[in-house]
Amino acid sequence: MLLTPDTFVRTALPGMKRCAAIVHAGPALGARFTEYTAEFDARGELGPTAAQRFLYVIDGRLAILQEKTEIGSRGYAYLPAGTSDRVVAIDSTRAVVVEKPYLALHSAAPPRPIISNEDAVTAQALNDDPDLQVKCLLPDDPGFDFAVNTMVYQPGAALSQVEMHVMEHGLLMLAGGGIYRLGDSWYPVTAGDFIWMAPWCPQWFGAIGKIPAKYLIYKDSNRHPLAEAL
Ligand code: UGY
Ligand code: MN
């Protein structure tokens, strides 16, 4: 599913104060997570959640109260399930929020909170292509049941294959644009667009334009495909 900003509808989620949510994906769609853009006024706040929560600031500034920390543009936070930390905007702020019920693994401890900034993460070339750089915002640790990465494509760079995989994706275009292939359809996409890719959705992207294309991408990880059924 591709959602472009002209279709976005704002809503309030329970407990939100001075904040609106554009819900991009959720279980009603078949997704096993929910993802929304939260638009805060200064002193706006998210409601509580029992789920684990990941936040990435597009612009503005958020205070993560229990952690006694602030995050600005490109800053991010991972808050484990059950922490119900308060997230309060200092300025008018836009942030991407992912929430997902945690799938525990007997052999790994549940993750602890993380507060960081994308600028502090080292980029890695995907498949040795220097024009396609990936930053993994969460550690490579089996305790995490999902990953969130940023991917930056120089103009003309592309995925080296049409991917089909068990993981689902939530993707927000942050900059630039290109062509996204989803199944047998090819879509021009640009900053602000959101894509949900169901498990095994055939997917490919090529960057077009004069500036690099960048997106933030969620995927489930580190769990057996039967994990939820057992
Ligand atoms: O991590 C991924 O699966 C990523 N390469 N997929 C994508 O960009 N559509
Ligand atoms: Mn993929």
Image (spheres, rainbow, N blue to C red):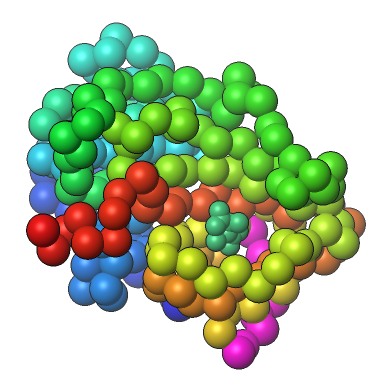
What residue occupies the far top of the structure in this picture? 68
Instruction: Check residue 205 for magenta coloring.
Output: no
Span highlighted in magenta in the image: 184-192
- Say whether residue 200 is left or right of residue 85: right
In the rendered image, the vertical position of residue 86 relative to residue 106, given as above or below: above
Q: Is residue 188 magenta?
A: yes
Relative horizontal placement of residue 30, taking residue 14 as reference (left or right): right
Residue 207 lies in quadrant: bottom right
Residue at x 11% of width, y 31% of height: 82
- In the shown orientation, is residue 125 left or right of residue 199? right
Q: Could you tell me which quadrant the C terminus lies in?
A: bottom left
> Does the magenta stretch mainly form a helix, a strand or a loop?
strand
In the rendered image, residue 117, in percent from the top left (x then y), is placed at: 53, 24
Q: Would residue 24 be found to the left or right of residue 184 on screen?
A: left
Task: In this rendered view, identify the residue nearer to me: 151 or 4.
Answer: 151
Q: Residue at x 13, y 63 (%)?
A: 229
User: Which quarter of the image is occupied by the N terminus?
Assistant: bottom left
Residue 53 lies, with reference to residue 165, above or below; the image says above
Q: Residue at x 75, y 63 (%)?
A: 160
Q: Quadrant of ligand 2?
A: bottom right
- Please provide percent x and percent y for residue 167: 42, 61
Question: How far from the left and from the top, in percent, is residue 91?
Answer: 42, 28
Q: Position of residue 92 (x, y in %)?
A: 42, 35
Residue 166, quarter of picture:
bottom left
Is residue 4 in view from this perspective? no
Q: Quadrant of residue 178?
A: bottom right
Q: Residue at 37% across / 22% down in the picture?
A: 114
Q: Is residue 197 above or below residue 16?
A: below
Residue 202 can be seen, yes or no: yes
179, above or below 112, in the image:
below
Q: Residue furthest toward the bottom? A: 184
